[in-house]
Each structure stands twice: as structure tokens, then as C-alpha cells.
Amino acid sequence: MDLGEINPVLLVASLMVAATPLLLAAIGELVVEKAGVLNLGVEGMMIVGAISGFAISVETGSPWLGFIAAAIGGAVLSLLFVLLTQFALANQVASGLALTLFGLGFSALMGQSYVGVKPPSMGDIHIPLLSDIPVIGPILFQHDPILYLGIALVAAVWATLKYTRVGLILRAVGENHDAAHALGYKVIKIRILAILFGGACAGLGGAYISLIRVPQWTEGMTAGVGWIALALVVFASWKPWRALLGAYLFGGITVLQLNLQAAGVAIPVEYLAMSPYIITILVLVILSADKSSAPASLGRIFHASH
Amino acid sequence: MIVLEKRPQPSKAWSYATPLVAVLATMVFGGILFAILGKNPIQAIGTIFWEPLFGEFAFYYRPQLLVKGAPLVLIAIGLSLGFRAGIWNIGAEGQYIMGAIFGAAAGLAFYPLDAFYVFPIMVIAGAFGGWLWAAIPAFLKVRFGTNEILVSLMLVYVAEQMLASVSLGLLKNPEGFGFPGSRNLQSYESAHNAELIVGSGMHWGVVSALIAVIFAYVLLNRHMLGFHIRLTGEAPRAAKFAGVNPARLILFCLGMSGALAGLAGMFEVSGPSGQVSIDFNVGYGFTAIIVAFLGRLHPVGILLAGGLMALTYIGGEIAQSQLGLPAAAIQVFQGMLLFFLLAFDLLTNYRIRAARKEVA
């Protein structure tokens, strides 16, 4: 065992990369839940995003087009969730599960001819001057553009929810859909837009795994990241910046356990690999005492009788 | 303009009809999917639904129907109890794995003892393993209010790692030439969950599944606890006033579904599968969710739905070898089924009316 081989700078830099898929998926789901909808299909939307992004970027040679396709792919799958929960008024838990089961199968089907293919690389941005600073430079200023997009999205969601009229309406719909409806807001329309946004974000997160983090395609490669993202929203008490913090925390655990595996620590590989899931459970337990910040209409079906 | 009008009572007729309509819709859209994949849709659908039952080699496939259907029914029965009360155990896959590990471990501990009590002990150990794994989210929900959906799902990944760990370490066959995986229980007489009638596919798991169906039916229709489960799901406020103890209900529903999933895993590992290995689990725990919904969370419905889903598994395998249909296509097919079911369920609870524009 040689812990000295773990380079702290690289560790923190790769932590940010590991956290980004989680962050993207979680910030999307946060908006969905703020609108009062519980979409458990994050894992399904992520994996569909992962394969759509992968396929398009391999076919076109452009990772950018890949990410756009991933966002569209995730959003299209979430459209099925819209149909089920907003129009057919189906149970949201069951519909979310259906989305995940369907997405896993669908992505495996689409991805058959892409196993073992190498996607085009996106390349990192080297911000001049800043990226040359020792320690801080490699950690903060030498990443791919999507990672920065993730952080920008957190800021945008935070500002929108807190300071804009759109954010206020979204929160109103999530807190009390009957009151929002009575005030004349289009509850269903707002929720549909929120769900589509969540789908697009989850798709981006999935593509980040298949195009940047890994980068290759394997069946079921999201391996529960979508579910951890759902836990992360609870962890964050539905606050965007806390989602960022949580994502980095989980990213850190993932990277650390991978590094410990590589360093050959005396703990068996399997126990290290299960640690992110166990820590997710522990965090959920610690934070579940306080439910006061959850949107009040979360998971409830809205049907305007007149 | 089309408007939805909530029915005062869910429609009985539609509640029976929706699963059938959903299956038909899945066949149509599945056929379109197969056509896109370049297969003859009618031939593909025929292969999946007809071949296992009445085809040339049906004598081989029919017993498989029981082998594949039993774990699905066993798990789905357990899940349906919780789903009815709004308690969402979606980690049955993990409980299935733990049941298999515990059951196999108990059997292997006795190896090579030849005694009648080895198998019953394995059954108890398997149920205990599944129960234990489901008791974690149950306890955390009761004690701390933790979301059982996320915890039970996280534990699936933990169980998968456990499975990898024991097949490479603790339970590895000492005479296995270093290959991962445990001793084969099929060749250890006392621990083997053999067919009760040779060639019928009928093993103890199938018997247990049938018992579970009867047990669930009696519980839900003739017992106070079953009434409380239904009441909590249909009218949570009324349940509160009726003095239903939610903690007891959570512990029972999750524990029961865990124990049944564990049993399913144990019967699988000691019978059809034979050994604990890294790729032992094939997703029965997740497919059982579809089975539970397709069966309308009703014991008899689940029995039928389990049979149908087993049919798509077997038919899918035949279509895979005969027509070259990808394995994932069947997974999509099964996912579609749940989609259509949830969508058509609208007709059970709502009436669709064409409304004239109201004049103010």
C-alpha cells in the first residue's frame, strides 16, 4: 500500500470531473421537484442521454453536437413521463420507475454497435494566466467546458428561483398547485417545462459520463448515479448551492475510493466500491429528520376539475 | 375539447381490461420496434408469444415457464403488499441477491453432510437474508423517516458488490480451480432444490409462489392487517382515524417483501442456477415491479402477469437465437408494457368526455 502515490491536486481535479454528472442530473431534478413533481426516472434519462450523446458525437465527430443530442434525448424520454403523469394522471413513483426500466433497455438496444468505440474528445479549456497558477490552476481552471456549464447552471437555477418572477411561479406551483391554479397560473404547462428541463439536464449528465468521464459506452454505465442524484436533491434540502456542495462531496468519495483501490489498500475492492452507496444512505438518514423544506405538493397529482 | 371527469368509483370493467389493452398496445408498438430493427414483426411477436407454448419444442419451454415465472410471482406478491399501502420497496433485486447468498451459505456450511434438515435450514436462511436487507430501509423509515425508495435501491448496488465479494472469496469453491463462484449446489443432494416431478419445471420455488398467492389473497381479503394495508393506500386519512399503526405496517410490508424476494433468490441459487456467481442476478427484482403493476397488485392478477412476463423472457430468448433479435429489445418490450399499463389506467379512474366550450 502506498498512499503517497495519491496526488492531492489530481485528486481534487478529478473529484470535480466525477461530481459533474451528479451535479447536472441533480440540478435538473431539483427544478422538477421545486415544481412539485417527483420524477424517479433520472437514471433512465441519464442513460438515454449517455447513449444519444455518444452515438451522435461518434457519428458526427463533434462532442458539442453529442451533448446537444444528449439533452434532447433526455428531454424526449422525459416527455413520456409528461404524458403519463400530466395527461394520463398516473402515479409518479410508478411512472418514474417505468422510465428507468424502459430507458435502460432502450439505451442497451441503441448502444449495441457502439461498444468498444472511442468517442471524439472534447479537450480542456486552458484559461490563460489562471490555469498557470500552481495547485489552484490545475484544480479549477483546466477542465472541459461542460464542467463549467454545470456550475453555471447551478448559479442560473439559484438566481432564477430566488430573484425572478418565473422562479416565484415555479415555487408556487410546487408548494400549492390548487392555489396557483386559482391564481390563473398554468400548473400543467409549468410542470411540463420543468420536467423537460430536468430531462435535458439528466441527459447532459449521462453524456458527461460516456463522453468525458469514462469515455466509452457500456450497458448500464450510469450505475446508479441517477439515483444518487435523487438522494442529492434531498441532501441539498432543495437548495441549488447545497446540491453543488453535495455533488462534490459524493464526487470526492467516488474518486477517493477509486484511488484507494489503485493504491492497493488492505480493504477489499468490493467494499470500497460499495462505499458511495452506503454513504448516500447514511447522509439520507442524517438529513431525513428535517422535511420542512420539501415542496408541499411534491408527488401529488394535479387535476383541475373546472 | 376533451375533458377528463373523475369517476366516483374506479371502473371495474376497465380495471380488468387495461392490462389486456396494454398487452395489445405493446404488441403493436413492439412490432413496430422489431420492424425498425429489420425483423418481420408478425413473426417476431409470434415467436415470443406462441413458440414457447405451442411451438415444436414447447415440451422443453413449458417447464421453463414455471422456472422463470416462480421468482417473478414470489417477488411481485411481496412488492404488491407494500405498493398497495404506498410503501415503495424497489430494491427487491438486492433482497433477492442476499437471500441467495444467505441460503447458499447455510447450505455450504453443512457440506458434505447428507441430512434432511439441510434444505429447510437453507430456506429459512434465504428468507432471513432477504428480510434483513429489506429491514434496513424499513427500520430507517420508521426510526428516522428516511425515504425507503432511495435506501432500498442503494442497497441493490451494495448487494451486488457483496455478491462479487463472496463469489471471489468467502463462498468460492475450494475445488474450483481458482474460478470465481461457489460449489454447485445441484451436485450436493441435500441442498439441491430439485424438480419435484422430473421434467415439469416444478420445484419448491414454484410451490412457494403458489402458496404466497393464496396467502396474499387471504391476507388482503379476510384479515384485518390486509384491510389496513388497503385502507392506508386508498384513504390515508381514514386509516389514521381507524388507528392503523403506520410503523407496524411499514415493517410488515417491507419485511414480508424482503423475505419473499430472499426466498426467490434462495430457490434460484439452489435450483436452476446452482451456484453463487458474480452474474447470478438477472434483474428479476426489477421485472417483478412490472409484474406487480401488470397484475393490478392483485394476487391472482400477479400470478397471470408473472406467467406472461416469463413468456416474454423465454420467447425473447427463442427470438434471440432464431431471429437474431437483440436481448435488449425484450427489455424495451417489457418496459413498454409498464408504460402502456400506466397510461391506460387513466380509463379506470377517469371518464373521457367531449366537452362543449362553455359560454360565459
Image: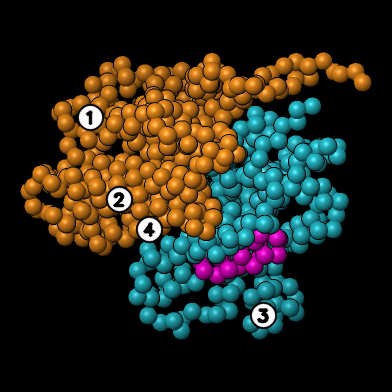
The answer to the question of whether label 2 and label 4 lie on touching residues, with beta carbons closer than 8 A, is no
Q: CA distance from mark 1 to mark 4?
A: 31 Å
Residue kind at label 3, given as amino acid type: Ile
Q: Colour of chain B?
A: orange
Nearest to N terminus: mark 2 or mark 1: 2
User: Can you identify the residue that label 2 sits on?
Assistant: B128
Confirm whether circles 3 and 2 share one chain.
Answer: no
Q: CA distance from mark 1 to mark 3?
A: 64 Å
Indicate yes or no whether the magenta region holds residue A176.
no
Q: Nearer the viewer, mark 2 or mark 4?
A: 2
Residue kind at label 2, given as amino acid type: Phe
User: Can you identify the residue that label 1 sits on?
Assistant: B201
Supply the letter of whichever chain is cyan: A
**Which residues lie in the magenta part?**
A236-254
Indicate yes or no whether the magenta region holds residue A241.
yes
User: Can you identify the residue that label 4 sits on?
Assistant: B161
Q: Look at the picture and state if B344 lies above or below A72.
A: above
Q: Quadrant of the C terminus of chain A?
A: top right
Label 3 resides on the chain identified as: A
Confirm whether circles 2 and 4 share one chain.
Answer: yes
